[in-house]
Amino acid sequence: QVQLVESGGGLVQPGESLRLSCAASGNIFIISVMGWYRQAPGKERELVATITGGGRTNYADSVKGRFTISRGNAKNTVYLQMNSLKPEDTAIYSCSVTTGGSVHWGQGTQVTVFS
């Protein structure tokens, strides 16, 4: 079993910042990809950002230049620095880890950006 624990969500105003964290534990082999996805009410889940074991990053166009994904020194932790937040960034943000050929998901953390 692989467990993912997310933290850092909250309620902010437009233009403010938040930093999400996700720590993976359990039966972890080589992590090939870690990432963040989000799902807004009434919408499908969408990719926000991913980072490979080699450090290659990928971002949704809607967050490029505002969000930064990074890995922790322990390599089983992933962060999402979110700057210049907009109301349309409001969603449940979930962490994912691909290891041993399987994808594992966290419970999600709520991010709300309100005027």
Image: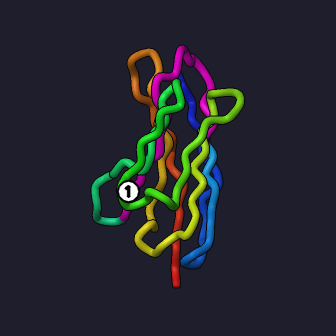
Q: Nearer the viewer, residue 55 or 99?
A: 55
**Residue drawn at (57%, 75%) of the image:** 15
The quadrant where residue 40 appears:
bottom left
Counting from the top left corner in percent of width and height, residue 102 is at 40, 22
The quadrant where residue 12 appears:
bottom right
Measured along the vertical axis of the image, is residue 95 above or below residue 48?
above
**Residue drawn at (58%, 64%) of the image:** 83
The structure's colour scheme is rainbow
Q: Nearer the viewer, residue 96 or 47?
A: 47
Residue 35 is one of the magenta-drawn residues = yes
Mark 1 element type: strand
Residue 18 is one of the magenta-drawn residues = no
- Which residue position is annotated with label 1? 39
The residue segment tinted magenta is 22-40
Q: Nearer the viewer, residue 46 or 43?
A: 46
**Residue drawn at (35%, 56%) of the image:** 61
Counting from the top left corner in percent of width and height, residue 35 is at 47, 39
